Amino acid sequence: MDDPQAGPGADDFPTSATRITLNGLGMRCADVVRIARSQASVELAEDAIDRAREASEIAERTGAERAVYGRTTGVGANRDHIVDSGSAVEHGLRLLRSHAGGTGEPRSPESVRACMAIRLNQLAAGGSGVHPRVLRALSSALGVGALPTVHTRGAIGTGDLTALAEIGLTLAGENPWSIGGIPPIVINPGDALAFISSNAATLASVTLAWHDLRRLLRASHVVTALSFLALGGSPEAYAAEVHAARPHPGSVECAAAMRRVLGLDEHPVSGRRLQDPFGLRAFPQVQGPALEAIDALESVLAIDINAAAENPLISRETGTVFHHGHFSTAHLALALDRVRAALHHVAELSATRLGDLVEPEQTGLPAFLASGPSGSSGIMILEYVTHDALAELRHAAAPVTLGTAVISRGLEDHASFTTEAARSTTTAIDAYRTMLACELLAAVRALWLADAQLPDVPAGRAYAMARDTIALTAPDHQLTGEIARASTVIDRLADY
């Protein structure tokens, strides 16, 4: 777990390096984010080229002696079809062309850049058997900012075949670059499957989602703290003694973060009630599992973005080719299902706190935090907005790992649907951001109407920043602009 005393956002990017060396060993999730969002460039380790050359030579020798899947044979149910020697030269390009059937919207530039960086790092591990020129081409493309067009649909958690085939055809000069470009390269017969045998596109989407959700969860400590202050919450629920008695790591971390953000050690407060509603009182117990789930997701990602998971695997140590099932991403799919389920519980508490903030018995303020003639609606509509978002999140939280698929004439008889889990996770994150923005707007408005004077602690500084940025208006008015401004504040709150 993160050190709660370090402050939110303190370890997002522990290094300020602007160039990250990829060697297939130590890439971190934070590195992927920095590369994807153009905060860092990449450099390919020279020994990665040596490993790739050695593996490529082993694969070529083995293919001359016996069948090697995808290199001397067809793929899927065509695994027993030996490639005719007369058409072997075109075999790789045929595989890329036939698998480049992606549909849907094009992936965002940052997602494509993350995909390319992850795939390059995986290839640098030296287990694929692709020719070193493929690594050099990917590295060059990242270096000059060249990006292919990659579509979102076409994978079911058994390899991002369509996405990587599109990148492969672009490297080969058959597909146009969407941004920039580099000279085309030769695709050897054995390069195609070795290149597309990866889940790099899905890993890219998940890594970016991991980062964004971790920031949101940190911001939610601050939003909840502002609701706590507006509602006159009791600090007993966050006491260290309470959480030492049942020390789940996530709950302990959350409670410590709440004490820090509220400055309870320096500025103790007493609550208005003997016991608060669950939205405040049970926050550590509900937020804790989400914090643990996002850490567990990072652990899975840290393995997969550095993995030589290609099928077949070329072992440089033994000079052997292994056929296997590392294309399966059940670990990642299950981790994502866990994250979304935990997030749904956290989001429900945000909705309940919003309900408390519009209740006069809880705040001592007018109903719906209205300011105007009798019957004014104030922020009544925020409950509709937040429950709309919660319904979307609830639908996105449904597990994807309860289904499967049987394809390729019955040979491929299991799928994890990790790609779909990644899309659902992005949807859930966007919905939760909207909910937090609504709660933040309500909490800030309540404190503003009460003319609250907060101490110089993280929550107090966050309130001043949010109040000034949102630019509140007292009488009934359209809230769309304030919700939008509150959304921009959310990401900044992760640093308080």
Image (cartoon, rainbow, N blue to C red):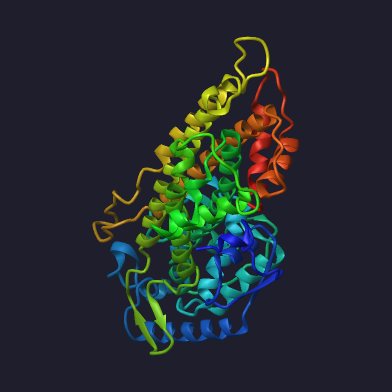
State the residue lying farthest toward the bottom: 318
239 vs 192, nearest the viewer: 239
Lateral position of residue 375 relative to residue 240, left or right: right
Residue 23 at x, y percent in the picture: 57, 78
Q: Residue furthest left?
A: 410
55 up-or-down from 113: above or below: below
Question: How many marks overall?
Answer: 0
Q: Is residue 220 left or right of residue 38?
A: left
Q: Nearer the viewer, residue 182 or 231?
A: 231
Q: Is residue 271 left or right of residue 290?
A: right
Is residue 191 rendered to the left or right of residue 493?
A: left
Residue 403 visible somewhere in the drawing: yes
Name which residue lies at 54% across and 38% down: 271
State the image quarter where residue 393 is shown.
Answer: top left
Residue found at x 35% / y 47%: 399
Query: Where does the image place residue 339, in percent across and percent down from the top left?
Result: 43, 52
Q: In this view, does 6 lie above or below 254?
A: below
Report whether residue 212 is seen: no
- Judging depth in this view, the residue of 148 and 122 nearest the camera is 122
The residue sitting at 48% across, 30% down in the picture is 387
Query: Where residue 281 appears, x then y in whole percent?
Result: 46, 42
Residue at (74, 37) in percent of width and height: 469
Question: As rendered, which of 236 and 9 lies closer to the eye?
Answer: 236
**Quadrant in which residue 392 is drawn:** top left
Q: Which residue is situated farthest in the top direction here? A: 374
